[in-house]
Amino acid sequence: MLGGTFDPVHLGHLRSALELLEVLQLDRVHMVPAKVPPLRDTPQVTPEERLTLLQLGIGDTPGLVADPRELERDGPSYSADTLASLRREYGDQARLVMALGHDAFLRLADWHSPQRLFELAHLVVIDRPGCEAPLTTALAELIEGREVFSPGALMRRPAGGLLRLALPTRLSISATEIRRRLASNRSVRFLLPEAVEGRILDNLLYRRR
Ligand code: ATP
């Protein structure tokens, strides 16, 4: 699972999802847009629209799935609930991985039920350019004894490990920068898939109101 606000989805997300699939030898990557992201402001664009942009971005890419399950739940979109739902679907023995960027990982101790995430899945932290801050004490305690150092080490158990991973392609693209560019009428070409760019421009999304 790669959760996020996807406000909007960009090539940093999509390329990372694809490389996770390959490097970790996963069957598929569920990309799950948050309906109500718990730790940030409400996005300007509706969850349904963010899902549509994600579907357009993924297109027919094998192994990547635009997963609407958080849109079907009320209240804050907690990843622990999403992982529990995936666990029910795939069963106790399946290897589940929750991937997140290093920026998101640094705030993990503030998430809802962070211990439970490790009961349900392995956590894989994707290196992201410009996000090298030290870990807080709470985060260091949370991950104590969990770290492994190769994708193969995650194969032995269905959940519970932590792997920090430098994927082959590191893209310093962020949705914040894309929203800024759109708000000031600057080009976002080559930062996100053409179909996503087309829909955003046609519908005047992310324009300053
Ligand atoms: P924003 O700038 O609005 O915070 P974002 O670009 O970080 O957005 P999110 O939807 O918040 O996008 O990200 C979803 C997940 O993807 C997070 O775990 C985030 O760390 C990760 N991620 C986002 N951009 C990249 C990137 N360029 N490379 C690798 N991981 C990324």
Image (spheres, grey):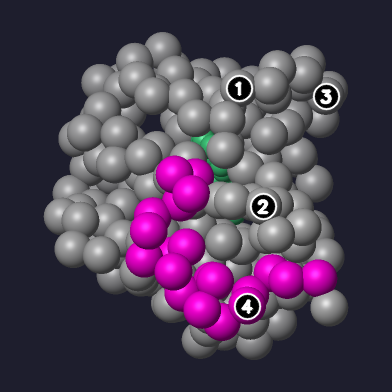
x 44%, y 69%: residue: 198
Q: Position of residue 138 (x, y in %)?
A: 81, 30
The amino acid at mark 4 is Leu
Q: Nearer the viewer, mark 1 or mark 2?
A: 2
The amino acid at mark 1 is Pro
Residue occupied by mark 1: 129
The part of the chain drawn in magenta is 189-208
Q: Nearer the viewer, mark 3 or mark 2?
A: 2
Between 136 and 13, the residue placed more toward the observer is 13
Distance (Cα) linking label 1 and label 2? 23 Å
Tag 4–tag 3 contact (CB < 8 Å): no
Of mark 3 and mark 1, the one earlier in the sequence is 1
Q: Is residue 193 above or below residue 89?
A: above
Distance (Cα) linking label 4 and label 3? 40 Å
Give the number of the disc on residue 136. Answer: 3
Does the closest atom of ligand 1 sit within 8 Å of the Cβ of label 1? yes
- The image quadrant that residue 61 belongs to is bottom left
Between 48 and 186, the residue placed more toward the observer is 186
Please check the rendered image and state whether residue 198 is part of the magenta-colored stretch, yes or no. yes
Between 39 and 57, the residue placed more toward the observer is 57
Q: Position of residue 175 (x, y in %)?
A: 63, 51
